[in-house]
Image (tube, helix red, strand yellow):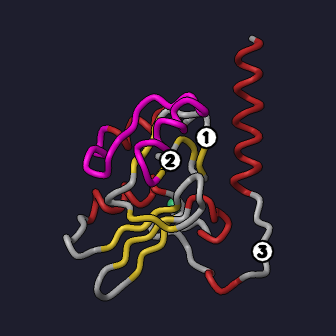
Amino acid sequence: MKACFRLFLILTFSGVVACSNPNSDNSNTNTRCAQCGMPTEEFQAWRSKIISSNAVKHFCSPRCLFINSQAQGLAATDSVLVTDYYEQQWIDGRQAFYIIGSDVIGPMGHDLVPVATPQAAEEFMQEHQGKRILTFQQVNETVIKHLSIHSQH
Ligand SMILES: [Zn+2]
């Protein structure tokens, strides 16, 4: 019971952090997630995008990016960019490390948390009770489905 309440607090708090938007009048990035339609500027900490030769697709989170790229495929020339959890900067999504199963909750529930280096991934695992570190290539349909199951409560 006690542990359950604590988890509830963590989830609630993370939700508040993810939704807060201190730059609400900075409207130059008024773009919606290409997968779920949520305004991506409300989730600065999770923003992700795919840049191809003729278009840029914005996503609210790595999770939406992966769902979309698995459904529609990625060209070898497409650039994948995700936001580093610690530095809050764009990093190369193909080179990033993704942690799943942690206590950090994204805009759509459980998400893949991107960091730039293996060291940062290990640090994150310890700090946030992560379950697994995955590379870009290791994130497949099964991983995404598993995230969805855990996001339904
Ligand atoms: Zn989305």
Counting from the top left corner in percent of width and height, residue 86 is at 59, 53
Ranked by sequence position, the earlier of labels 2 and 1 is 1
Label 2, ligand 1: CB separation under 8 Å:
no
Part of the protein shown in magenta: 116-142
Q: Amino acid at mark 3?
A: Ser
Q: Residues within 10 Å of mark 1 (few under 14, many from 20)?
A: many
Q: Are marks 2 and 3 in contact (CB under 8 Å)?
A: no
**What amino acid is at disc 2?**
Val
Q: Which residue is mark 1?
A: 104
Give the mark nearer the N terminus: 3 vs 1: 3
- Magenta stretch contains residue 124: yes
The residue that label 2 is drawn on is 113
Q: Residue at x 31, y 52 (%)?
A: 136
- Say whether residue 148 is visible: no
Q: Write down the residue under mark 3.
A: 24
Q: Residue furthest left?
A: 76
Query: Residue 44 at x, y = what percent?
Result: 63, 65
Please name whichever residue, 12 or 85, is drawn nearer the observer in this view of the structure: 85
Label 3 Cα crowd, 10 Å radius (few <14 / some 14-19 / many 20+)? few
Mark 3 falls on what kind of element? loop
Q: Is residue 15 above or below residue 8?
A: below
Gap between marks 2 and 1, in whole Å?
Answer: 8 Å
Q: CA distance from mark 2 to mark 3?
A: 24 Å
